[in-house]
Image (spheres, rainbow, N blue to C red):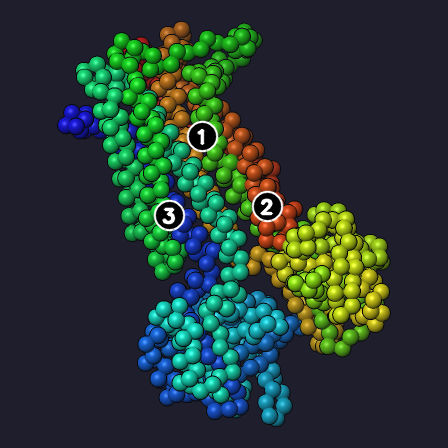
Amino acid sequence: MRATWRWVHSDLRTHRGEALFAVLASAGVIASLLLAAALLGYAVSPWQRVFQQSQGSHVWLHGREGREGFDAAAVAPLAALDEVAAVSGPFRTAAATLETGGTRAGVALRATGARPPDTARPLLTEGRWLTTDGPRDQVVLERTLARTLWAEPGETVTVTLTGRRGPTTRTLHVVGVAETAEPRYRAGQGDGVGWLLPETLDRLAPAATGQSVGLRLKDADDTDYAVQRAVTLLGAERIDQVTTWQRAKADLGGDDRLLGQIFAAFGLAALLAAAVAVAGAVRARIRGQAGDIAVLKAVGFTPGQVIRGFLLQHLGFAVAGAALGTAATLACGRWIPGRVGAAVALWPRLPGHRLAVTGVPVAAVLLIAAATALAAWRAGRVPPVPAARQAHPVARPLSALGRRALGRRLSPVLVLGWRSAFTAPGRARVLGATARLALPIALMTVALVAWSTLGQFRTDPARVGRAAALTVRTAEPRPAAAAAAALEAVPGVADAVPGAEFPALVPGQTATITLRGLGTADDPYPHAIAEGRAPTGPDEAVAGQGLLDLLGVRVGEWVRMTVGGRPQILHLVGRSIEPDHGGRVVSTTLDTLRDGAPDLRPAFHALVLRPGADPRRTAAAVAAATGGDAEVRATADPAGGEDAPRGVLAALAAVLALIALVELLTLIGTGVRDRARDLLALRAIGLTPRQIGAVVVTAAALTALAAAVLGTTLGAALGHRLVDAEAAATGLGAGVARLPDPLFLGALVLAATATGALAALAPAVRTARHRLADSPGETF
């Protein structure tokens, strides 16, 4: 064992540069994986992120209006409960309606101070907090409520409160937009939150008696018991509603499972690619020291000693790199500008932090150790000194195609570079190296496919089932033809499609689906058809993937459902991309629905806008054209308007780019060393040093080009299938995957090729300057 340690120490002193590269490569890969894991937690747990940043409340108790409320004295005993860590409030509240540009939304106005509360603190995303300066009546709106109203800081909204003397209307100045860990605004399912100063609420609703108080618990699992004790202390007659963190989390993070599956798969693939890259560097280093190993065995080292030596050495590199990368990420990651730094700073307070911090480095080290063990076992089989020359591959002769190319005076640099890249020292080894380099590039392409798919929810909503950008509902129904004509006369509106929506029961009444009537036979709705065709005849319909999976039917079959106590039988002629209700939607024409209900009138109109029309300005124009009696709503964005998922994809792409760079550097170094005699022979027959260097650069560029073409091709095909499979699993339906622009993929291939050429410059210069020699121990 002592001899093994002495050899390891001597080898480290001799090859300091290679050892440093191995440690830094491992550290860079581990740090990148940890940063991606932090961003993953930041993106797939939006409620957890907001809850931790805002010191949110697990429970909100809302008092009844018009009855005796709970003041600070009544709330004080809540802080003494064993389960309660902090109390937010109580806050006086008033229910109201906000309106701007024809869009209305319910809001719970909450009086708070000029300084946000410490517990359940709203997180400003735009604008500023409330002050006594500036406009008189200021309000900060919850983010989803502001998005529904298209309200931004600096604009005004109209607030209407209904009191004993009738409705009161005032104007509020929006000064900020904030996030909160409470349930977000959804039309018809719950009011949003607006924060204003107490004096503002006094002017709007002097007799407001609603109250809200938030409780932050020591243990989230004690929620039910804590609610019982709090209600008992305050009195059940004072409580109108209780909202808990479970509801808020389900409301804000409904797509966490899907995003978690996608990002976890990317993370595991990146970890595997990192292990393959680092293990390839280990194998290349061991192969480069074949001569030294042969000498060691000649002087008495056993195969077991050689194997142990390499295992100890490279396992030490992996552990040192993992420790360095982890320490650097935890210590300096929070100082990275932008969302990455914010994610790392918040990461310790998110669930799964400790598991990721320990699991990612340990998994990487174990994978590297497994690959190192295989390479070390091969090192133990290296023959002693007399056979050491076999460690250097024997070059293959120039092929007939290469000789013809040289005979036609094709550039010898290009011909010899092609030969170095794809024939010498052995095709199996060259193909293996190209495949290892293509792996991270393929995964990058998969990430780009996911990026492009998320981007089309904004750039091309019609392709993902969002042809209508606005929905208009009127208080007093008008004749469908007159209403449609009036709406289509508004500038920016291309088509006003009448529609109605009903809950329906499937056969056996075991589940509820949504039956939607849109358009007529003469004016059909532009469904996004992924399979089959759009409905045109009587009793024809299209369904979402979720409904097909629920009923176990296919396109072309007939389905039966119950609507309002009457049966409805429809022929499914197509599958549509349906982002609503988990895809459990069947859509037909209003003409078909009128066959069973002749008096059916449209409940809303879906507005398809002209290309380039601004939804916000069009909504204001619709409100003005209808005299203010219409409610205009923007169609919900299936992507939620969040950029965090795309940020994680960008981070993973950066991680994979680093992994590809490590593999590329290893491939170049190995290629130069394995082709040492070839390059020296070329110099002996008359090639200049500049031409020899150009051969090295050309070989690296061609290898990178081949790997990039292979990786982008396989990645595009794999990414398309994976995204469609995930979309089908969520009910949205296959057919939403979108490949990146071909020019972008071409730019990726060119970038990989240029990186290969640039990475080969330094080895090329060293090779060109090397003296003419031919020795079994020749290494570079």
In the rendered image, the vertical position of residue 375 relative to residue 133, given as above or below: above
**Label disc, if present, on residue 175 of the rendered structure:** none
Decide: few, some or many residues near mark 2? Use Cα within 10 Å; few <14, some 14-19, many ≥20: some
Say which of 102 and 261 sits in front.
261
Let me know if residue 322 appears in the view: yes
The amino acid at mark 2 is Ala
Q: What residue does disc 3 label?
A: 34
Say which of 508 and 14 sits in front.
508
The amino acid at mark 1 is Arg
In the image, taking residue 586 as reference, residue 139 lies left or right, namely left
Instruction: Name the quadrant containing residue 722.
Output: top right
Q: What residue does disc 1 label?
A: 436
Q: In which quarter of the image is the N terminus?
A: top left
Q: Where is residue 148 in the image (x, y as percent from the top left)?
A: 59, 68
Dot placed on the residue nearer the N-terminal end, 3 or 1? 3
Instruction: Name the quadrant containing residue 366.
Output: top left
Q: Position of residue 583 (x, y in %)?
A: 65, 56
- Of circles 2 and 3, the one toward us is 2
Dot placed on the residue nearer the N-terminal end, 2 or 3? 3
In the image, taking residue 660 as reference, residue 107 lies left or right, namely right
Q: State how far apart marks 2 and 3 are (Cα).
A: 27 Å
Q: Do the residues labelled 2 and 3 touch (CB within 8 Å)?
A: no
